[in-house]
Image (tube, rainbow, N blue to C red):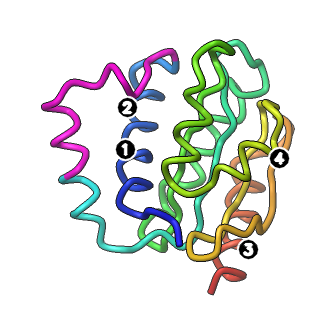
Amino acid sequence: MLNLKYVAIAAGLGAIMVAGGCGQKAAKVSSDDRQRLEAFGERQATEPKVLAVAMHADWCGTCQTLGPRLMEAAGPLEARGVQVVKADHTSRTDPQAESTLTDIGLGDLYAKNGGKTGVVYLVDADSGAVLDEIRGANHSVEQIATKLTGALAEAG
């Protein structure tokens, strides 16, 4: 089973990274921010059912298009159980993506991905199974929302 409390915290960190610049690393989050994010995780009304695991890098053009569309599509579905988790591949020398995914029980997904960016894996939060994926920047917000909704239905 995945570490869902950490997923909620990672999702909150991802929102901060997106809002404040994708180059920020979780290790640089202040202790005050970490406490606030832990409280965020405890306040979640809905346990995550689907994790939208975004393999992201600041230098990735596809990520620069796909990331904001994913956040827009996932926002209204958060109450139904969609959580976005950002695996940051920006620095090849800092294994941020690997540690993020390993910490929440998805180390195998990192290994299988092979460092590719511009892809979002839709993962069943209970089993860790990949339900679907979104690749490339050619998906509209509506198409991404449709895939997220389909993954929610499959996750039950």
**Relative to 120, 31 lies left or right:** left
Q: Could you tell me which quadrant the C terminus lies in?
A: bottom right
Q: Residue 26 magenta-drawn?
A: yes
**Which mark is in front, 3 or 1?**
1
Say if mark 2 contacts mark 1, CB within 8 Å.
yes
Instruction: Measuring from the top left, give residue 86's x and y in whole percent.
Output: 56, 39
User: Few, some or many C-alpha atoms within 10 Å of disc 1 (few <14, some 14-19, many ≥20)?
Assistant: many
Q: Residue at x 37, y 74 (%)?
A: 46
Q: Distance between the residues labelled 3 and 4?
A: 23 Å
Instruction: Measuring from the top left, give residue 113's x and y in whole percent.
Output: 81, 42
Q: Which amino acid does label 4 sit on?
A: Lys
Q: Residue at x 77, y 45 (%)?
A: 140
Total number of numbered discs in the rendering: 4
Q: Residue at x 51, y 66 (%)?
A: 2
Residues shaded magenta:
23-38
Say if mark 4 contacts mark 1, CB within 8 Å.
no
In the picture of the structure, the residue carrying the numbered disc 4 is 112
Q: In this view, does 133 lie above or below 149?
A: above
| Nearest to N terminus: mark 3 or mark 1 | 1
Instruction: Measuring from the top left, give residue 9's x and y in whole percent.
Output: 35, 48
| Nearest to N terminus: mark 4 or mark 1 | 1
Instruction: Give me the disc on residue 12.
Output: 1
Q: Which amino acid does label 2 sit on?
A: Ile
- Secondary structure, mark 1, is helix
Q: How far apart are marks 3 and 2 (CA)?
A: 27 Å
Instruction: Give me the disc on residue 150.
Output: 3
**Relative to 99, 144 lies left or right:** right
In the picture of the structure, the residue carrying the numbered disc 2 is 16
Q: Residue at x 48, y 61 (%)?
A: 76
